[in-house]
Image: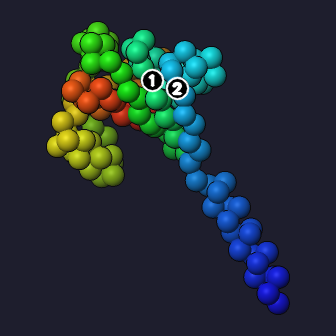
Amino acid sequence: MGWVRWAQALVVAGLLAACSSKVTDYATLAEAQTAGVVAQGLLPDALPPSAALIRIERDETSPSGYFHFSSADFAPMVARLSPLTNLPADPQLQSWVQRKDLAGYSAFTLRQAAANWLLLCAQNKGRCYFRRLG
């Protein structure tokens, strides 16, 4: 009977792995672009040339992740973005934005043909978090 429980546990573990998010890391923006993640709608098309250490998490709802950048690229990057004015009525998303705001991140949106993006960026940290909203 022990092998049946082991097989059941293996099936459950496989199902959980299939349902969890897939994480992919890229060292540079050029590497991410070569992999096609911008064209696939997994990464916003507004990252500065210095973007590096890019992480993309894919799940059933929408891609999200973060990237690092040179603080000198902050102003040109946010010039392409709009300040966040209206957040979707999603308590989890609202809580995440509020926590990042308290940590010094500013909230921006980016509207692209196929998707809307939420970006939370901090110039002094050289880091942005992103999430596709639709």
Q: Which residue lies most toward the bottom here?
A: 1
Q: Secondary structure at mark 2?
A: strand
At horizontal 74% and vertical 69% (from top left) the residue drawn is 10
Mark 2 residue type: Ala
Whether residues under marks 1 and 2 lie with C-beta atoms below 8 angstroms apart, the answer is yes
Q: Secondary structure at mark 1?
A: strand
Tag shown at residue 72: none
At horizontal 62% and vertical 55% (from top left) the residue drawn is 19
At horizontal 64% and vertical 57% (from top left) the residue drawn is 17
Q: On the rendered image, what quadrant is the N terminus found in?
A: bottom right
Crowding around mark 1 (Cα neighbors within 10 Å: few <14, some 14 to 19, many 20+) is many
- Residue 51, compared with residue 131, is above or below; it is above
Which residue matches tag 1? 52
| Residue 40 figure quarter | top right
Measured in 3D between alpha carbons, the distance from the residue under mark 1 to the one under mark 2, in whole angstroms, is: 5 Å
| Frontmost residue, 62 versus 20 | 20
| Frontmost residue, 9 versus 69 | 69
Instruction: List x then y, in percent, for residue 106.
Output: 21, 30
At horizontal 18% and vertical 36% (from top left) the residue drawn is 104
Tag shown at residue 27: 2
Left/right placement of residue 122 relative to residue 67 reads: left
Instruction: List x then y, in percent, for residue 121.
Output: 28, 29
